[in-house]
Structures are given as structure tokens and as C-alpha cells.
Amino acid sequence: MKATIKKFEDKMTKSCAALDEELATIRAGRANPNVLNKIMVEYYGVPTPMQQVGNISVPEPRIIQINPWEKSLLKSIEKAIQVSDLGINPTNDGTCIRLVFPELTEERRKDLSKDVKKKGEAAKVAIRNIRRDANDTLKKMEKATEITEDERKEGEEKIQKLTDKYIEKVDKSVEVKTKEIMTV
């Protein structure tokens, strides 16, 4: 039974990690290289993650600079950024690409914090679904006489405690990101 509970705890951990990765790609007030994580660049006909085609740095709080390993990639990187949902026009100076992040408006901050809350709710739903699956598994194990009724109830209590713990983690992540977005 411990292995079963551990398996479901791992799934909950992965849900929290996935939320944290998603939240990292949402830009707050400062330039954060993580906003480029999902952008793929056409490199010799193969879609390649932005981090693998050049050096990404943040020389100033509102600027991300991308220095490609090969100058021939400048156009591909520029195109990849333009077709992405970043909403920022890249500046190509012939040697590197700069992304200048404008100050977020109050309205945009509110929209972003709503988006963060939605992602947090989705993560909570995923965790609750994992709890339901875990409880179903325990009930099946009891039916198959692999565990007793007391063991099932004990297992369900452990799963509930894990669920509470991970939902609290999700709330904390959402709270931290919302605070970061709303800070001017």
C-alpha cells in the first residue's frame, strides 16, 4: 500500500512542478529569460529550444539579450519570437537580438493575475483528480482482499493529508506569483 500512496504522491508533486514551470513563463514586471522557454527556433529544419541556439542574458531589468551561437540564426530567432505569444517585437542589431519589456499597465497586471489564478485552479483540479484515482485504487485493492477496510481508511486519510499539503503548495505558488505581478 505504501508504494501505491507513493505513486500518487509523485503524481501530485509533478502537478505542482508543472504549475511552477507554467508560472515561470508568465512575465511579471522584470525581464525573465524563462518567458522564452516555450519558444522553438527553426535550426537546420529542426525546431530547437531557444536556450540551445544562443546565450540568453538580462543586461538590464527590462531587457533580454540573445546572442546566437551562429549569426545565421538571427533571422530564425527573430521570426520565432514574432510568431510567439510574447507580444514583444525583437530588435535585431546584426549581432544579437534584444527584447525590451515595457512597463505593465494596471489592467494587464490584473489580467495576468487572473490567468495565474486559473492555472492554480487547474492544478488543484488535477491534484483532486489524483486523490480520486488513489481512493478508487484503494477501494479496488480492498475488494480484491489485498488490504483490509482499516488499511483502506488509513490510506484514504494519508491521501487526503497529501492532497491538502499539495493544494496548500499550489495556493502558495499562486500567491507568490500574483504578488510578483502586482508589484509595481
Image (cartoon, rainbow, N blue to C red):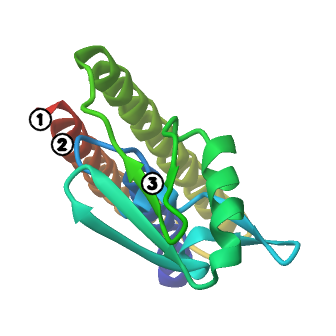
Label number found at residue 183: 1
Which residue corresponds to mark 2? 180
x%, y% of residue 25?
A: 44, 52
Whole-number angstrom distance, CA of label 2 to CA of label 3: 15 Å
Q: Badge 1: how crowded within 10 Å, few (<14), some, or many (20+)? A: few
Residue 117, above or below 131: above
Earlier residue among tags 2 and 3:
3
Q: Position of residue 180 (x, y in %)?
A: 18, 42
In three-dimensional space, the C-alpha distance between marks 1 and 2, rounded to whole angstroms, equals 5 Å
Above or below, 148 relative to 161: below
Q: Which residue matches tag 3?
A: 35
Query: Which quadrant of the figure contains the C terminus?
Result: top left
**Residue furthest out toward the top:** 107
Q: As drawn, which residue projects farthest toward the front?
A: 94
Q: Position of residue 18 (x, y in %)?
A: 49, 59
Please tell me which residue is depicted at 42% across the width and 51% down the height of the picture. Answer: 99
Q: What amino acid is labelled 3 in the image?
A: Val
For residue 37, the mark is none
Q: Residue at x 56, y 76 (%)?
A: 4
Q: Amino acid at mark 1?
A: Thr
